[in-house]
Amino acid sequence: MQHLAHGGAISHFKRFQTVINVLVKNGFGEVMARLRIWEAVNIERRLLRRHPAMPELTSPQRLRTALEELGPTFIKLGQMFSTRPDLIPPDFINELKKLQNSVNFIQPDVIRKNHRIRTRPACK
């Protein structure tokens, strides 16, 4: 059972690294640096200072883009935040509202297949 737990931990760690990389790519490295993320994942501090891949976009646009790239769970988070003007500034709310009705639809079969692949037990 330890083997499966270890494999799951590695899978979660890789996903965490993916999330951090997408956020840094979209210009949120400074936020990651303030949270001292480099201490939790194998990432060099200098990479957190990287300029955004699309500097012409505003911060709210880059956040929406990052959430879309990270997938359905993060899109849902953005959708929820778009309804919370008590927590999120108006310019971010306006951009995140775009996640309500302009996100590409994913077929349920694709989601099921992806879930099965990610939750499949590791080989011995």
Image (cartoon, rainbow, N blue to C red):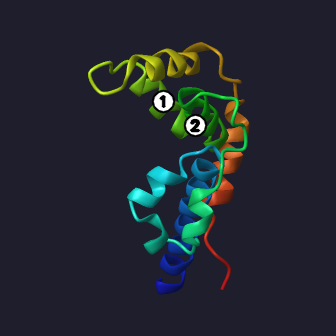
Disc 2/disc 1 C-alpha distance (Å): 7 Å
Quadrant housing the C terminus:
bottom right
Q: How many marks?
A: 2
Q: Is residue 36 above or below residue 54?
A: below
Q: Amino acid at mark 2?
A: Leu
Image coordinates for residue 13, horizontal then vertical, percent? 53, 68
Secondary structure at badge 2 equals helix
Residue 109 drawn at (x, y percent): 72, 37
How far across and down, in percent of the image, does residue 47 sit? Answer: 62, 64
Label located before the other in sequence (2 or 1): 2
The answer to whether 95 appears left or right of 83 in the picture is right
Q: Is residue 46 left or right of residue 78?
A: right
Residue 50 quadrant:
bottom right
The circle drawn on residue 95 is: none
Q: Is residue 121 left or right of residue 1?
A: right
When asked about the image quadrant of residue 27, the answer is: top right
Report the residue at 58% width, 58% height from top: 49
- Label 1 secondary element: helix
Residue type at mark 1? Gly
Mark 1, other Cα within 10 Å: few <14 / some 14–19 / many ≥20:
many
Q: Is 26 displayed left or right of 5 in the figure?
A: right
What number is the disc on residue 78?
Answer: 1
What residue lies at 69% left-to-right and 24% top-to-bottom?
105
Asked whether the beta carbons under mark 2 and mark 1 sit within 8 Å of each other, the answer is: yes
The residue that label 2 is drawn on is 67
Query: Which residue is at a point 45% across and 64% down the rendered structure image?
Result: 37
